[in-house]
Every structure is written in structure tokens, then in C-alpha cells.
Image: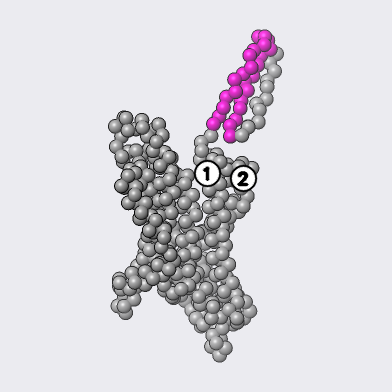
Amino acid sequence: MTIPTEPTEPTGDATVLVAESDSSQGPKPPATPVIAGRSPARMAWTRLKRDRASMIAFVVALIFILAAVASPLLSALEGWGPVSPDLKGINPDKGNFPLGALGGVSGKHWLGVEPGTGYDVFSRLVYGLRTSLIVSLLAATISTALGVVMGLAAGYFGGKVDSFLNWIMNVVLAFPQLLFIIALTPVITNAFQTDAHGGTSETLQLGSIVVIISAFAWAYTARLVRGQVLSLREREFVDAARIMGGGPGHILFKQLLPNLWAPILISFALAVPTNIATEAALSFLGVGVVPPNPDLGSMLESATQYYLYDPTYMVLPGMTLLLVILSLNLFGDGVRDALDPRANRN
């Protein structure tokens, strides 16, 4: 008679399976447990899914990202564009304030209209989200890539190369970044006037903002990668690659870089919300996206003129910016905790 033994429950990060025993052939020695291991990426994803706050933040951030991607569709569904004023939605006899309650909220304008201009607030919000995400993602990608290359070179080669690159990092980190970004942005954009009226195209304006933010943000990633490479370059697998004839390029990008994906991903995830806040601050101060192009920072700047009479117009872009940055920051913290092997498991 065969008595099956139920498999045990999964334990920790591995699954233990116990073989069946047959009593007709006499007692058998205890079965050796079979360990089904999991990859570091799968273990990190499991830890991330257990973090309820991070998953809620991920869902909220994903909603905003999808709204930004689908902004042309959403705007067409509502029937108004970001720079299509509805002059019938404002009252010229009363300071061009929106008609109706809550800033002119209606079935025609889901979130009301902008005081003074009559622009549809919903369309400007979703298009402003798209602008902020484009700038922040491009700047984070460029600064992360540049920081990884500089950090790899400084940490691996050492000596004069490390001293020179480390000096550059210290100089960049010592700058008051926001102040210099504010000062340099109009200088660069005015140097490339492309319009017939002496203005700058929207694409060039956004490109200059991306380049300037990236120029000041790469040093953080470089410093992080350099510290990791200093500890990894003395490991046995690097010595083995040298003995087998691997050149610096092979060691840097085939041996060291695959072991740095966790800190690089963390740095990128935390850089995106920081860049969104920087881009909004530049537009609020008048050196970012130029009106009437939609942007959350410029909407907040315009709202300062009307907040006593129409507080809704300030609350909507302010809450949108707050929720986007907060959700991305919380998700970035969750990614950091999930990828950290020393993080406590719940």
C-alpha cells in the first residue's frame, strides 16, 4: 500500500518538495529536499508586491502616465484643446472670470475654464502632464546614462582618471543647481531663436530644459556607481576576466555593469519625480515652458492672480502636481527597498 506524503508549503524564497515513500519495500531514508530557487529580480518583485503603499502609488502614477499619453484622445473626447479658448465660458464684464460655480465646471468643461483666457482646464492639465513627463523621463535617462559611464570609468581606472572625474563631480554637486538652471535656461534658448518673430520653438525650449537638467543631475548617479565599482573591481570574477584577456570595455560593460542594475534603477526611479518638480519650478518662474503651451508650473503661476476669486484654478494643477510627485517618490522608495538585499521582509 502506497501512502502519499503531501508536499510541504513554500518556505521563504524557495519551495521544498518531499518525495513519496512506499511502505511495501520497507523503510527508506528521508528524502532530500529539492530547492527551487528564484532569481533576484523575482524576489525583488515579490517584496515590492507586499508593500501596499508602493503598489497604491504605482497605480496612481500609472493613471497619470496613461492620462498624459492619451491626452490628445481625452482632449478630443471632451471637445476642447489646450489652447482653444471658450470666450463664452467667461464673463468679460466681471474680469473674465468663469461663468458658473467651481470655476465653470460643466458637462462642456469637466474641470472648468481658465480665468482670463477661457482655456479648458482639463485639456491643459493632461497636456501639461505630458510635457512634465517627457522632460523628466528624457532628463533622467540622459543623466543616468552619463552618470553610469562616468562612475564606471572613475571607479575602475582609478588614479588620475578617478581624481579628475571625482573633481568634476564635486564641482557639479557644489553648484546651487536650481539657481544656475534658472540663469542658464533663458541664455541658451535665446541663443537659438528660430521663429520669425524672434521666439524659440517649443521643441527647442523643451530640449534646452532637458539638457540643462541632465547637466546638473548626472553627478549623483556617477557618485553612486563609482562607490559600487570600487568594491566590485577587486572581486574574483573581475580578476578572472583580466586573466582570460578581457579588455577594459569587456570588464566595464560585460562584467561590472550587470552587477549594478539595482542602484542604477533606484537612481533613475528617484530622479524622475525630482525632474518633474524642477521643470514645474522653471515654468512657474517664467523660464520653462512658454505660455500658451500647457504646463503645470505655468498654470500655477497664472493661478496666483486669481486664487482669491477662483481658488479652484489653483487647487487643480497644485493637487495634480502633488499627487504625481508623491506617487512617483513613494514608488521609487518601494523599488529601493525591494532591490536592497538587506531590506526587511514583511
Which residue is under mark 1? 339
Which label is found at residue 131?
Answer: none
Task: Residue 177 in the image: state x and y as whole percent.
Answer: 42, 64
Task: Residue 320 in the image: state x and y as whole percent.
Answer: 56, 66
Q: CA distance from mark 2 to mark 1?
A: 13 Å
Quick one: label 2 or label 1, which is nearer the N terminus? 2
Seen in the picture, residue 176 relative to 151 is either above or below; the reply is: below
- Residue 14 counted in the magenta span: yes
Tell me what residue is drawn at x 44 percent, y 74 percent: 286
Quadrant of the drawing holding the C terminus? top right
Task: Residue 68 in the image: state x and y as whole percent.
Answer: 49, 62
Question: Is label 2 in contact with label 1 (beta carbons under 8 Å)?
Answer: no
Task: Between residue 27 and residue 178, name the one nearer to us.
Answer: 178
- Residue 281 counted in the magenta span: no
Q: How many marks?
A: 2
Seen in the picture, residue 255 relative to 320 is either above or below; the reply is: above
Identify the magenta region: 13-37
Which mark's residue is nearer the viewer, 2 or 1?
A: 1
Give the quarter of the image for residue 244. Answer: top left
**Residue 59 shows up from this direction:** no
Tell me what residue is drawn at x 31 percent, y 75 percent: 195
Which residue is under mark 2? 50
